[in-house]
Amino acid sequence: MSTVDFRDNLLGISWVDSGWVPILNPGNVLDYFSERSNPFYDRTCNNEVVKMQRLTLEHLNQMVGVEYILLHAQEPILYIIRKQQRQSPTQVVPMADYYIIAGVVYQAPDLGTVISSRALSAVHGIQSAFDEAMSYCRYHPSKGYWWHFKDQEEREKAKPKSKKKEEPSSLFQRHRVDTLLLDLRSKFPPTFYQPKPGEKPIPVEVKKEPEPPAETVKQEEREPATKSSAPVPPSKPPPEKRARLQ
């Protein structure tokens, strides 16, 4: 029984006949490869002519045209078959190589196909990377360009929010605040006092300091005036200039 994966490109085709797999060996691998259901086999080749005439494979060296030979054998898993164009008994041109692994036949790609496939894969990967990068790019006239990734919001939500530690106040700040509070309390004393929470506030009696008598204030005002009215000693006049005698 054979299974074939039909595609336009022979590099994507694989073929196997499960009935031959247990008995494969270097002596019958070319007969296995020349099965009619094998899509890699060319029925116009010299091997088909030798097979119909019941000749040995040694007669292929005396013919001109397409032929298949066993290039390498590594029993029981690997066999390599070459397709070549024979131009003379001593001159051949390789056309394609086929490898058989566990009974499954594949066509080996040539160097040009390998390079083309690798280059196409690289270009496709680069193009995909550019397309994905462009999908994360954002622009706004006021902000300009920036990157907006899909998982950025999820990461920000998943991050634990760290609480900012409050720095303790310095000695200068505490002392300065206490001074301001005492100053405000002296200027604006409380008018009510609440002993316990929920109780009715009690008015606070503010004791007024007695004002000093008017005579004492007047006397204090007079003292600096008398001190300022003390006699000032007269200043000496400048010495007179005497005429020099010649």
Image (cartoon, rainbow, N blue to C red):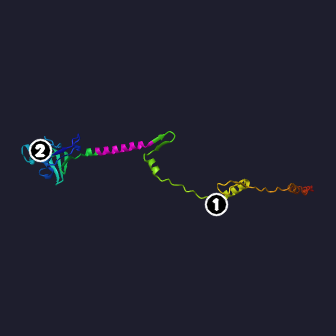
Occupied quadrant, residue 215: bottom right
Q: Secondary structure at mark 2?
A: helix
Q: Residue at x 65, y 59 (%)?
A: 174
Q: Secondary structure at mark 1?
A: helix
Q: Residue at x 45, y 51 (%)?
A: 158
Note whether 190 is above or below 47 in the view shown.
below
For the stretch drawn in magenta, what is the main secondary structure?
A: helix
**Where does the image place residue 72, in percent across and percent down from the top left?**
17, 52
Q: Is 129 displayed left or right of 58 in the figure?
A: right
**Where does the image place residue 85, in percent across and percent down from the top left?**
16, 43
In this view, the residue farthest toward the left is 54
The earlier-in-sequence mark between 2 and 1 is 2
Residue receiving disc 2: 47
Residue 25 can be seen in this image:
no
Amino acid beneath label 2: Asn
Give the residues drawn in magenta, as a range.
116-137
Magenta span includes 80: no
Tag count: 2
For the residue pair 57 and 206, the one nearer the viewer reads as 206
For the residue pair 95 and 243, the one nearer the viewer reads as 95
Q: Is 28 displayed left or right of 157 in the figure?
A: left
Q: Is 125 displayed left or right of 70 in the figure?
A: right
For the residue pair 18 and 226, the one nearer the viewer reads as 18
Q: Residue at x 26, y 44 (%)?
A: 113
Disc 1 crowd rating (10 Å Cα; few below 14, some 14-19, many 20+) is few
Q: Nearer the viewer, mark 2 or mark 1?
A: 1
**Where does the image place residue 19, in percent across and percent down from the top left?**
14, 49
Residue receiving disc 1: 171
